[in-house]
């Protein structure tokens, strides 16, 4: 039975306002302090347009995609503090499960790629043994106790 790959991309963000979860489904996201950013970070150490996330198709596969994070705004202007991924300063990085992204002091995100396989075939309801209980019968039975 063929299987369809089901992926969920998630970013857990910690900044000056606490912790938030952000599912990733769009082709691109702007990340930064500016109110117009798709993913807003709350910290004075974050640039107004700190980074960009871009969704790209996986090579050698018709299923799935990945996200690349790029330092700076879409025009190529780098952020003031740069990006650190897993402890290394980078200009861009193809995100992998559990990568830690540091935007500045006390501002970080963890990227999660959650995968599971779902069967494509529909299941037939006759495969399940379902016993229905008449609600009126239950009331009668309760009175007997």
Image (cartoon, helix red, strand yellow):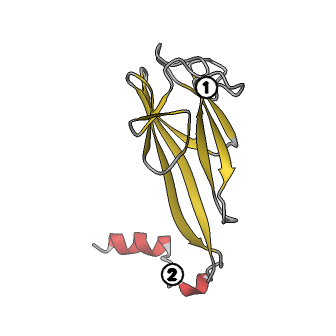
Q: Residue at x 60, y 46 (%)?
A: 67
Left or right: 138 as drawn, with respect to 130: left
Nearer to me, 63 or 61: 61
Left or right: 138 as drawn, with respect to 76: left
Label 1 and label 2: CA atoms lie apart by: 57 Å
- Image: 97 above or below 84: below
Work out whether residue 19 can be spotted. no
- Label 2: which residue? 130
Please state the horizontal and vertical placement of residue 41, each as a whole percent of the image: 52, 23
Please state the horizontal and vertical placement of residue 66, each as a whole percent of the image: 60, 51
Which quadrant does the N terminus fall into?
A: bottom right
The residue carrying pointer 2 sits among few (fewer than 14), some (14 to 19) or many (20 or more) residues within 10 Å by Cα, namely few
- Label 1: which residue? 72
Nearer to us: label 1 or label 2: 1
Which quadrant does the C terminus fall into?
A: bottom left
**The quarter of the displayed image where residue 14 is located:** top left
Please state the horizontal and vertical placement of residue 35, each as a whole percent of the image: 62, 18
Q: Residue at x 34, y 70 (%)?
A: 143
Q: Residue at x 57, y 58 (%)?
A: 7
Nearer to me, 23 or 142: 23
Work out whether residue 132 can be spotted. yes
Left or right: 28 as drawn, with respect to 126: right
Please state the horizontal and vertical placement of residue 81, each as a whole percent of the image: 49, 20
């Amino acid at each position: 039975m063929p299987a369809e790959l089901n992926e969920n991309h998630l970013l857990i963000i910690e900044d000056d306002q606490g912790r938030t979860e952000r599912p990733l489904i769009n082709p691109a996201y702007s990340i930064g302090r500016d109110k117009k950013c798709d993913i807003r970070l709350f910290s004075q150490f974050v640039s107004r347009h700190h980074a960009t996330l871009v969704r790209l198709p996986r090579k050698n596969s018709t299923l799935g995609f990945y996200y690349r994070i790029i330092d700076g705004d879409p025009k190529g202007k780098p952020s003031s503090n740069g990006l650190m991924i897993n402890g290394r300063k980078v200009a861009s990085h193809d995100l992998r499960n559990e990568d830690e992204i540091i935007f500045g002091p006390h501002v970080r995100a963890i990227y999660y790629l959650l995968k599971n396989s779902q069967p494509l075939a529909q299941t037939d309801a006759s495969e399940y043994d379902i016993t229905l209980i008449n609600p009126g019968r239950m009331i009668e039975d309760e009175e007997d106790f």
